[in-house]
Amino acid sequence: MGISSAGPHCSVWRRWAQLRWLTGFHTRTLAPQSVTSAPGVLQQRKAPGMPTSVVSRPWGVRPRGGRALHAAPSSSQEVMLTSERYRVRRLPFSRVSDSDVAFFERVMPGRVITNPEELKPFNVDWLKSVRGCSKLMLKPQTTAEVSQILRYCYERNLAVNPQGGNTGLVGGSVPVFDEIILSTVLMNRIISFDKVSGILVCQAGCVLEKLNEYLEEQGFIMPLDLGAKGSCHIGGNVATNAGGLRLLRYGSLRGTVLGLEVVLGDGSALDCLASLRKDNTGYDLKQLFIGSEGTLGVVTAVSILCPQKPKAVNLAFLGCQSFAKVLETFTTCRTMLGEILSAYEFMDEKCMELVERHLKLSSPVTGSPFYVLIETSGSNSTHDEEKLKNFLEQAMTSGLVSDGTVATDDKKIKALWSLRERITEALTHDGCVYKYDISLPVGKLYDLVTDTRARLGQSAKNVVGYGHLGDGNLHLNITAESYSHSLLDAIEPFVYEWTARYNGSISAEHGLGFKKKQFIQYSKASEAVFLMQRFKAMLDPKGILNPYKTLPSGS
Ligand SMILES: O=C(O)CC[C@@H](O)C(=O)O
Ligand SMILES: [Zn+2]
């Protein structure tokens, strides 16, 4: 449908959207996977058909009021061991002995996993791209237990891999060799919530979506939302400084996290669990742990500032004929929507093709090379709709947008969001995925996709670009039939050099983990990396915490 026939009036849009909904757009409702059992304890329930050992499946297995859906890709093929695929040498840590296992059994009886079958899913990342061979997983319930574990590991020189929901995309959440997996899965207690200040204090293993559900009941939401919400743990979110879909509105975790409790490499617990908006007493130590990917300490509890739940939410899903129009639409909507703009996401037509082909989702808006998803969240639906209507009128009459649909009801909003949120999942069905999570000046964002596509030609199956345009964050993804060193060599360091040329970041929100750590110098000066290494040596002198991650090896 062209701009002229749609007409610039909002009600026309909505009627037209409803028609589209009836004709082509499907939503699915899945059974809930998680339940709240005792007050304050958020538990996960095994979904039907799921192996007992897998209580969580990342990247949004399940929808709630949220818009996440569906399971991770399954592959019958064994994932290659990280140590075989990449040239990496095991550091001289001790190996877990029977007496170590006996010690842990005494500390946390019944919460010590040594069964190789049970350990399997926790040794492999969600993308099925890296695999460790840990022989031991521990499931502490309290900070005191985490302290006991780390004190012992420190004495014994045993390496530890802290693990939340295992939803990471850079190989940071699984062991590289035989590190002990320290899972936060049973640390899922809400400690307090203050309705006046909106400050939530909870243990690190609370699932993001469960926290959001808990808050919604009280008229609040989490300041963070991402596709993996159904499985990811808040401690893991903090450890990676996850960005997600609400960052444009509520800012990064560096602003919303007010306090942390962390256990250091020698087992000492650091209580910085403040619940204050303002606190200028000395250095802000919690910032060191936000985004440190479990290499400086294990986050055991989080204090976080939560916004009010918006009363009115609207979504517009629009087609644009060029990336220049995507940018101009952003400028226009920022000006015209102002304080109610809560998300501005973009995706190219390849993304939509893959979502349709692999997940059988059909978009109500087709025929454009680019799509944008604009969300407004406010407190007055009449006011918000009026603003959105004016913006849409402007965008359409000026030719910025060539097609589109709007949704105000919850079900349609979720279904539209899933077109964006499920791109990651669709990509995994397309073959082997090479992921790049890049920050760039917004005007350059799509040039990287175009240049990469031209460079790789037929050697890649698909090269797609999407992401959080409002945050200057591109998700460049390349798929191929199978993993190949030569394709990787064609992509890297090309993508990193390109990014550095424009002073971008080679990891906007996913962290460096195992896969990107060797490339840190493209985004950080050597003096900065050196200082990071000194922090690491000070806080984790034996280097037992998440070794082989974040900081470059061999330096
Ligand atoms: O899979 C990716 O590249 C991005 C995942 C996530 O950060 C998203 O924004 O959907
Ligand atoms: Zn993202």
Image (cartoon, rainbow, N blue to C red):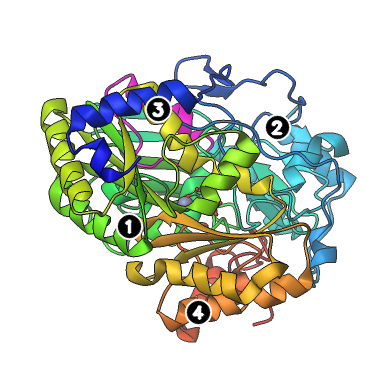
Q: Which residue is mark 3?
A: 20
Q: Which mark is residue 326?
A: 1
**Which residue corresponds to mark 4?**
498
Kindly tell me whether residue 227 is visible in this rendering: no
Residue at 79%, 60% in the rendered image: 82
User: How far from the left and from the top, in percent, is residue 36?
Assistant: 50, 17
Marks 1 and 3 sit apart, C-alpha to C-alpha, by 23 Å
Question: Going from the N terminus, do you reach mark 1 or mark 3 first?
Answer: 3
Residue drawn at point x = 25 percent, y = 33 percent:
198
Q: Which quadrant of the structure image shows residue 281? A: bottom left
At x 27%, y 23%, the residue is 219
Label 1 is placed on what type of residue?
Answer: Val
Residue 99 locus on image (x, y percent): 86, 44
**What's the distance in space between the residues labelled 2 and 4, CA to CA?**
49 Å
Q: Earlier in the sequence, mark 3 or mark 2?
A: 3
Mark 3 falls on what kind of element? helix
Q: Amino acid at mark 2?
A: Met
Residue 465 percent coordinates (x, y): 50, 59
Is label 2 or label 4 in front? 4
**Count of numbered circles on the image:** 4
Three-letter amino acid code at the position of disc 3: Arg
